[in-house]
Amino acid sequence: MRFVSKLDPGKVLAERYRVERLLGQGGMSRVYLAADLKLRGKVWAVKECLTRPGEPLLVAREAELLISLNHHRLPRIVDFIDADQDGYSYIVMDFMEGVHLDRYVGTRTEGLKVEELARFGLQMLEGLQYLHNHQPPIIHRDVKPSNVLVDGKGQLKFVDFGIARMFAESKTEDTVQLGTVGFAAPEQYGGRQSDPRSDLYSLGAVMLYLGSGCRFSVWSQEAASIFRTQGHGPLLSIVSRLLMQNPEDRYASAEMVISALREAVPGAADNYPKTSRRPNQASSVVHPRNGRTLVLALMGASSGVGTTSAAITLAHVLSRHFKRVAMAEMDPRATAFQRLAHMSEDDGLSTRSTSSSTFRIFGVVYAKPCARSEFIDLLTQGLDCVVCDLGAARGSELLEEFQRADLSIVVGSGAVWRSEELTRFEEATKAGGKLPLDLRFCIPFAAPSTIRRLGKLLHTKNVYGLPPEQEPFEPGADSTAVMEMICSDLLPRYGGATGTALQRIMHRSSYLIKPKR
């Protein structure tokens, strides 16, 4: 079956994306740069794929995977055009500028320093850690230099998920053996199922390849000797363990490799985010922004618990730390947006946008996306962060937004007779595979004793009481303290609620549980 592209420069796809030029190509796919005719000045990467007759629609699975992910090391999908009668389908995703990792290293006049190699390893592990901690875990299965881009700041990003798959504990081997020879783990050639350790093997192969002057990706004494003479001796034991033939002999998780690299080359971790996550805990909030819009989602455990008020308060607290903040009402049945627009206009608080679907109150943009495409458009407007008010609805699209947000917050009641609402919400979303592991609970008007009771009930320390707030558009000191504590991991390092500032917040607010001395 021969791949013949249907796209050429100048052609318009889906009446919106004008093809500019070819970016790259593989066996049964092409990637093009395309200009967005709706959002002037915006460009995307469009991947054109052809599915062979009788085979599963791998491209649809790739799109489904990408839609569920949200991490700055991974491409963000913004549109999917289903297969036509000839089997051609299209994924529209972020255009990531940079050069492929193998070309980046191959064109350098001098080899990588050991700190650079270790730093590249840490950056790839950051993306793999996020994938492996996804529920269910996602195995990339094709980690190789040509699937990684290096941007102008030396930051790495994965760019291809064509053969990624969910890990299923019940399976004993992969249905289809896929991967690139020289970088794929032995188990990917048949006999057993690939798991996170398969990606770690590929990581070791990439590091050996880069550290040997792009000569070797398979372990041998000659490769080890050249790797050492290139100045990468401190990493030799780590790479050799990653490349063990038996998965049980390799590192068990990305977290273990991160710790080993930091210990072997301390200087490599200078710009790497330090976290206090336990092994196997999802990295849902601790990662740098790198210019990407942060998404914070609030969902009510039931109606009438104050989700909208909490979302407004949070948005205006964040506006003190970020320049461009938006608050989006996502529940199509909700009416707060319309009432806020009229109220703020009457009171002279708001500034109307040129679009009737948005307005501003004290610098925060208020929006009501009516479809996912409109929400994606909002994310492409250069905002620093978007606070999503998901209400108490349980639609699949709203739950997906809740699951993939950078920070997910459940708003619930502190009343004893309503405690079951929080546990039912947790159980229902967990059963549907939509429960973020690093979840925060916000309880309006809750006293410290109520927070402790709910913390025990929900088996988490991430329960916060939100004090009464008469002016959510101008939050007071206590409300600000609680909201800054809830999202402290996402605030800018300087000027945010970090370090000693958090200690001051803890002492100032009566709505936070004080640490025992």
Image (tube, rainbow, N blue to C red):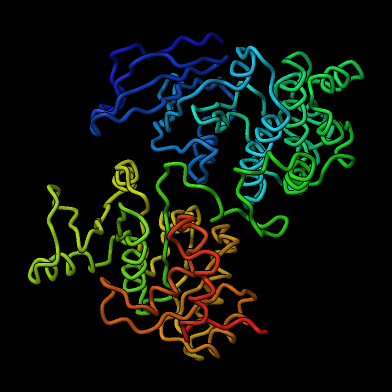
Q: Name the spot of residue 488 as percent of width and height, x first.
A: 50, 63
Residue 102 x %, y %: 63, 18
Classify residue 392 as left or right of residue 157.
left
User: Is residue 283 left or right of 171 when viewed as pictured?
Assistant: left
Query: In the image, what residue occupies the spot 60% across and 12% down?
Result: 107
> Could you tell whether 206 is left or right of 192 in the image?
left
Coordinates of residue 249 in the picture (x, y in percent)? 90, 40
Percent x, y of residue 471: 26, 77
Screen quadrant of the C terminus: bottom right
Which residue is at 75% across, 39% downward?
Answer: 265
- Residue at image point 88% right, 19% down: 225
Say if residue 99 shows up in the picture. Answer: yes
Q: Depth check: give the residue in front, 215 or 248.
A: 215
Q: Quadrant of residue 26?
A: top right
Q: Return the residue found at the far right.
A: 221
- Residue 157 visible within the image: no
